[in-house]
Amino acid sequence: MTDKTKCIVLGMSVVLMFLSGCATVDYVADANARVKAADWDRMETVPVVLREYSYTPSELHFKTGVPYKLEIQNKGMEKHYFTAEEFFKAIATRKVQSNADGEIKAPYFSALEVFPGRSLDLYFIPVTKGTYKLHCTITEHEAKGMHGSVIIE
Ligand SMILES: [Cu+2]
């Protein structure tokens, strides 16, 4: 290869790396605008119960564009996680609220840990349709059955 050819090949691989890098940065970019524009008076409340070792229901269904409060209630004896990285990338997040302690505003989350007997509320708007994996990342919990799906339709 000539130096010029090497330079072109290197240049193309840099462009490809840049493009593939962009494809993985896929949280909802205009989440803040979507949250502000939504009519939160028509928010729907959906509960999900965490215990040893399950989510009830194990399949959660949401519709794009509707504002939701997902009440993540740990009714078990142990700590549990609501981990759903791809789901969190598919929604516009308004906030997570602990009804005892306050609220956390952030553009996105990847996992929420809920202590026994406590709950966290996730306020969000579904944006991207799909079926997303939900699981508890504490050792052995998923293997014992603590997994499910979040479906945006
Ligand atoms: Cu768990």
Image (cartoon, helix red, strand yellow):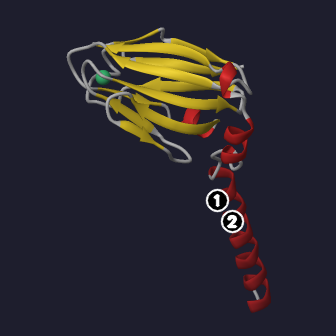
The residue drawn where x is 67% and y is 39% is: 35
Name the residue at the left extreme: 77
Name the residue at the top extreme: 57
Q: Is residue 107 above or below residue 75?
A: below
Where, quadrant-wise, is the C terminus in this rendering?
Answer: top right
Say which residue label 2 marks.
18
Where, quadrant-wise, is the N terminus in this rendering?
Answer: bottom right
The residue drawn where x is 54% and y is 19% is: 149
Say which residue label 1 marks.
21
Indicate the position of residue 13 as horizontal and vertical percent values.
70, 70
Q: Secondary structure at mark 1?
A: helix
Indicate the position of residue 126 as horizontal and vertical percent values.
67, 29
Indicate the position of residue 106 as horizontal and vertical percent values.
51, 47
Q: Quadrant of residue 61?
A: top right
Q: Badges 2 and 1: C-beta atoms under 8 Å apart? A: yes
**Quarter of the picture for ligand 1?**
top left
Q: Nearer the viewer, residue 30 or 51?
A: 30
Left or right placement of residue 38 versus residue 142 in this view: right
Task: Give amino acid for label 1.
Answer: Gly
Q: Report whether the residue tagged 1 is closer than 8 Å to ligand 1.
A: no
The residue drawn where x is 74% and y is 85% is: 7
Name the residue at the bottom extreme: 3
Left or right placement of residue 115 versus residue 45 in this view: left
Q: Is residue 14 above or below residue 55?
A: below
Task: Give amino acid for label 2.
Answer: Phe
